[in-house]
Amino acid sequence: MKTYESYLNSMHRLGRITGVIALIFIIGVPALTCWKFDIFPPLGNLMAGLGSLLVIYIPISLIEVMMYTPMAGIGGSYLLFVTGNLTNLRIPALIMCMESAEVQSATEEGEIISTIAVAASALTTTIIIGLGVLLLVPLTPVLNDPTLKPAFDNILPALFGALAVAWMGSSTSGFSQWKVAIMPLILATIVVMAMGGHAGRYIGILIPGLGLLSIIFARFMYKKGWIKVDSALPES
């Protein structure tokens, strides 16, 4: 009978293998394309471009690993960082599945549910993208209809709005501790109002930054006795 420890070991092994394979494809496809058509960029330009990106994305990546790994568990984390689309697809799907199953992070049940949730989200995304590619031409007149533009402009707010309503309205979601959301909500509102239309350009920094501030503020409230851990977590 397979034990939980052996399951985690197998997840680590498969995660490392698939991570290396994904990295080979990510680097190999553009490298082979450049070699095939002899269009390698000058080394100086390549390093300058990489430098400006790495300054932004290395801190974001480190923060995302610290934020999402405790939530997603071992198997879910490997899938998250290979398939991407964390904040807009994988994390909401993971949270809602754990909420529906009434399980906690960092438990055996949470580990299994989070892995299944991320995998199902990745498969669903792949199928939808495949259908989108096949149907792109016949659906172009419909997608370009001005009537639908407001809907497409509000997909992300609608997604997180629905997620917030489900969490804040549930006694087992942890967001019966609504006080935890006060400071991130205030800070996010101030930042968006101050930056206006430019806020979307920095969403990769804002979300991890606000997540870190949320953790700090929640710990502060816990130390002050304003929230209790037992009531902030669902029962297993």
Image (cartoon, helix red, strand yellow):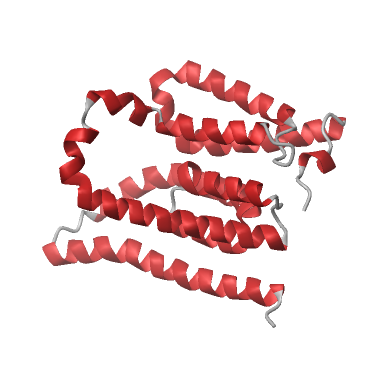
Q: Nearer the viewer, residue 79 or 126?
A: 126
Q: Is residue 181 visible?
A: yes
In this picture, residue 48 sits left or right of residue 146: right
Q: Residue at x 77, y 39 (%)?
A: 232
Q: Nearer the viewer, residue 215 or 35?
A: 215
Q: Give x and y (percent) for residue 132.
A: 27, 48
Query: Farthest residue toward the right?
Result: 225
Q: Residue at x 77, y 37 (%)?
A: 219
In the rendered view, would you say 139 is above or below 178? Answer: below
In this picture, residue 154 sits left or right of residue 16: left
Q: Residue at x 52, y 73 (%)?
A: 14
Please tell me how many numbered marks the rendered image carries: 0
Image quadrant in which you'd find residue 24 = bottom left
Q: Nearer the viewer, residue 18 or 213?
A: 18
In the rendered view, would you say 210 is above or below 66? Answer: above
In the rendered view, would you say 17 is above or below 50? Answer: below
Image quadrant in which you'd find residue 230 = top right
Q: Give x and y (percent) for residue 12.
A: 58, 71
In this picture, residue 158 sits left or right of residue 49: right
In the rendered view, would you say 160 is above or below 191? Answer: below
Q: Residue at x 65, y 46 (%)?
A: 99
Query: Farthest residue toward the bottom?
Result: 1
Q: Give x and y (percent) for residue 127.
A: 35, 56
